[in-house]
Structures are given as C-alpha cells and as structure tokens.
Amino acid sequence: MNTNYTFKKSAIEKSQYWELTEQGIVRRQQGRNDMHIPYSKVQSIRLLFLANNRYRLNNYCCRITAGKTVLDIYSSSYEGVGKFGEQASTYVPFVKELVQKTKTAHPACRILTGQTAAVYYGNLLLTVIVVIGLMLIFQYLPISWGLSLIIKLLLIGYLGFYILKSIKVNKPRQVEGSEIPDYCLPKI
C-alpha cells in the first residue's frame, strides 16, 4: 500500500494529495495537472521550520527540488480563517518514508535541513537590524522608562521563542544517510 498525505496551503488553494509509490512521488490537486516525480529525478529534499508562518511553533515544511520544479509540503493544513490544523502525526511518517525511498532509489539526492546559507544569514542580519531599530525607536519615544522596558520585554518574550527555534532548526546542514534529525520534524 502506498503512503499518502493531504494538506491545504491556504483558503485560495485546493487541497494537495501526495502519494509515495514504488516509482516516485505523485501530487494531485484539483484544477492542476497531476504531477509524477520519479525518485531518481529528486535532486534534494530540504526540511525546515517556518517561523514566520502564522506564528506556530510546530510549523514545518518539506521542500522537494527536482530540476526546475520546487514543491513544498507543509505540516499544517488550512481549516478556516486564521485556523490551521497540525498534522504532525501523518506528516512525520510521510516525510520519513519519502526520504527513505528517495535515498534508496537515488543515493546522490541531498537531504538538507534548514534554510539556504544566504537566507539563514540574511535573516540573522535582518533580525539584528530590526532589534537595533526597535531599541532606537523605544529610546526616543515619549513614554516612561518603566513602560518602555515592559514593552521591550513583551516583544522579546513574544518573538524570542520563534527566533531562537528558527536559529536552531534552520541552520543550513546536510544529512548523511536517510536518518532525519528530530529537530527537523514537528513534535507529534
């Protein structure tokens, strides 16, 4: 029996149905042509955390690159306005099997974790610039020192979890073999 996974990216898009066959990966989506990607054509599979995507701590993505085709499989699914259901219990086994089958059929396929180096270090630089900018803004706002400190601490606390997790998980790495590190997958 083939392993499958279904998710809906947004209100605008139809649900995507993914299936792992013996020959390759199949994606079906209403309104689009069915797509079949042989495992031998998959150049890389990138596993990353989407910190900037609706501020959920269990939001991951599996990015498949095959030639010029880049496809994303999300660990959450759109359910309604501002509501996304976590699907870690079906996403994790699907991704593990995807990596296993791809590496078995095509050992040269690279399994990557995190963002590309340019995106990762660019995001770090942007974060530093934003933090410095916020500190300067709060320095010159006509509010009391105590209120300013409280606002700064709230911002740091609110965004800190996402930034720290993103820094840890999205550091660019390459996985040897087909074992996926736990930090690259959502918690079940």
Image: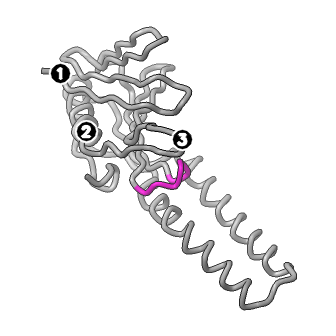
Labels 1 and 3: the sequence-earlier one: 1
Using the numbered discs, state the Cα–Cα distance from disc 3 to disc 2 in whole angstroms.
23 Å
**What residue sits 59% from the left and 74% below the top?**
156
In this rendering, the answer to whether 179 lies above or below 140 is above
In this rendering, the answer to whether 35 lies above or below 172 is above
Disc 2 designates what residue?
90
Assess whether mark 1 and mark 2 are in contact (beta carbons under 8 angstroms): no
In this rendering, the answer to whether 65 lies above or below 163 is above
Residue 108 lies within the magenta run: no
129 left or right of 155? right
Neighbours of disc 2 within 10 Å: few (<14), some (14-19), many (20+):
some
**What residue sits 22% from the left and 45% below the top?**
179
**Residue interval drawn in magenta:** 51-57
Quadrant in the rendering for residue 128: bottom right
Q: Is residue 125 visible?
A: yes
Using the numbered discs, state the Cα–Cα distance from disc 2 to disc 1 in whole angstroms.
13 Å
Disc number for residue 59:
none
Neighbours of disc 3 within 10 Å: few (<14), some (14-19), many (20+):
few
Mark 1 or mark 3, whichever is nearer to me: 3
In the rendered structure, which amino acid carries the disc numbered 1? Asn
Disc number for residue 2:
1
Q: Position of residue 165 (x, y in %)?
A: 45, 62
Q: 186 and 107: which one is in front?
A: 186
- Quadrant where the N terminus sits is top left
Q: Is residue 177 visible?
A: no
Disc number for residue 81:
3
**What residue sits 48% from the left and 11% below the top?**
31
Using the numbered discs, state the Cα–Cα distance from disc 1 to disc 3 in whole angstroms.
32 Å
In the rendered structure, which amino acid carries the disc numbered 3? Val
